[in-house]
Amino acid sequence: MIDAALVQQIADCYGTCRNDPAALSYLRDRFPQIRFTHCSDDEVGRATPVVACAGFNLYLVGGDHCLALTDSFDHAKGIVLADVDDEV
């Protein structure tokens, strides 16, 4: 189950390792129960991040048949790690 504390723990981990090319693999190994997707924040659209950090945002992914961004921890099945490009 994904909850606010787990998302914050993931944000803390990603914040320390996000510049490492193996960051996504590290998170997948450390949190095997979570499905991770990585992209640029400008690819996410107008969704509101569940956690906003310096340089990246985290979004929840949910859905039964088609995946979509959600703000509901109860429906979350995964997390999008979205890097923010400060030059945009």
Image (cartoon, grey):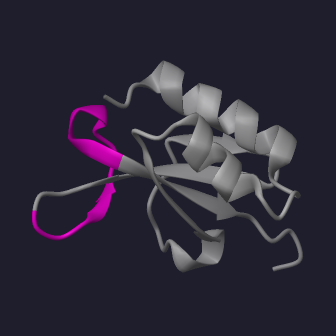
Residue at x 25% of width, y 66% of height: 67
**Image coords of residue 24 (percent x, y):** 66, 57
Image point (80%, 71%), residue name: 85
Question: Residue at point 72% right, 63% down?
Answer: 83
Q: Is residue 40 above or below residue 31?
A: below
Position in image of residue 35 (x %, y %) = 42, 52
The verdict on residue 22 being magenta is: no
> Which image quadrant: the C terminus?
bottom right
- At a point 66% along the width and 37% down the height, the residue shown is 11
Lateral position of residue 70 relative to residue 41, left or right: left
Name the residue nearer the viewer: 32 or 46: 32
Q: Where are the magenta residues, as a range?
A: 65-77
Q: Which residue is the extreme one toward the left?
A: 65
Tell me how many marks there are.
0
- Residue 52's spot in the image, x, y percent? 65, 44
Location of residue 61 with respect to 54 vertically, above or below: below
- Relative to 49, say whether 38 is above or below: below
Whether the magenta-drawn stretch holds residue 72 is answered as yes
Q: How far across and how far down the image is residue 55, in percent?
A: 81, 55
* Left or right: residue 50 compared with residue 84: left
